[in-house]
Image (spheres, helix red, strand yellow):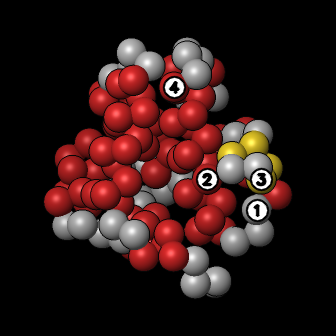
Amino acid sequence: MSDHKIFSMAFSKIYPLYVQKAEKKNRTEEEVIQIICWLTGYSSDDLANQIGAESDLATFFAEAPTLNPNVSLIKGVVCGVRVEEIEDPLMRKIRYLDKLIDELAKGKSMEKILRS
């Protein structure tokens, strides 16, 4: 695994940025929580515990109960890179989450974001 700087960033520092991005576009923190829980398998209580523990992103994803089986349906570009082409598994998971939050901020319905 590469040693990207983002891997050691605390999820608790990134989470408010996701919420802020969503709220700027008239979406809610509850929707952000729903997306994160859908992707990672965390319950909302487990998610709150991860935020409180200030886990880094590597730990956050390593301790995630289970990645959603529909994660392969997440496609598109984040930061100029196609998420489905990212080789590093941890970076791909981080970018999946980024992509889902981007879709929320762009006004997609939760049904489409959660690949229902």
> Foreground mark, 2 or 3?
3
- What residue sits right under mark 4 in the picture? 105
Task: Describe residue 55's horizontal placement relative to residue 94 as left or right.
Answer: left
Mark 1 vs 3: CB contact within 8 A: yes
Give the mark nearer the N terminus: 2 vs 4: 2
Kindly check if marks 3 and 4 are in contact, taking CB atoms under 8 A apart as contact: no
- Image x and y of residue 27, in percent: 39, 19
Label 1 amino acid?
A: Ile
- Whichever of callouts 2 and 1 sits on the residue coming sooner in the sequence is 1
- Taking the image as drawn, is residue 62 in sight? no
9 in relation to 17, above or below: below
Q: CA distance from mark 4 to mark 1?
A: 22 Å
Residue behind mark 1: 86
Do the residues bearing badges 2 and 1 touch, measured as CB atoms within 8 Å? yes
Name which residue lies at 24% across and 66% down. Answer: 54
Q: Position of residue 115 (x, y in %)?
A: 63, 28
Q: Label 2 belongs to which residue?
A: 95
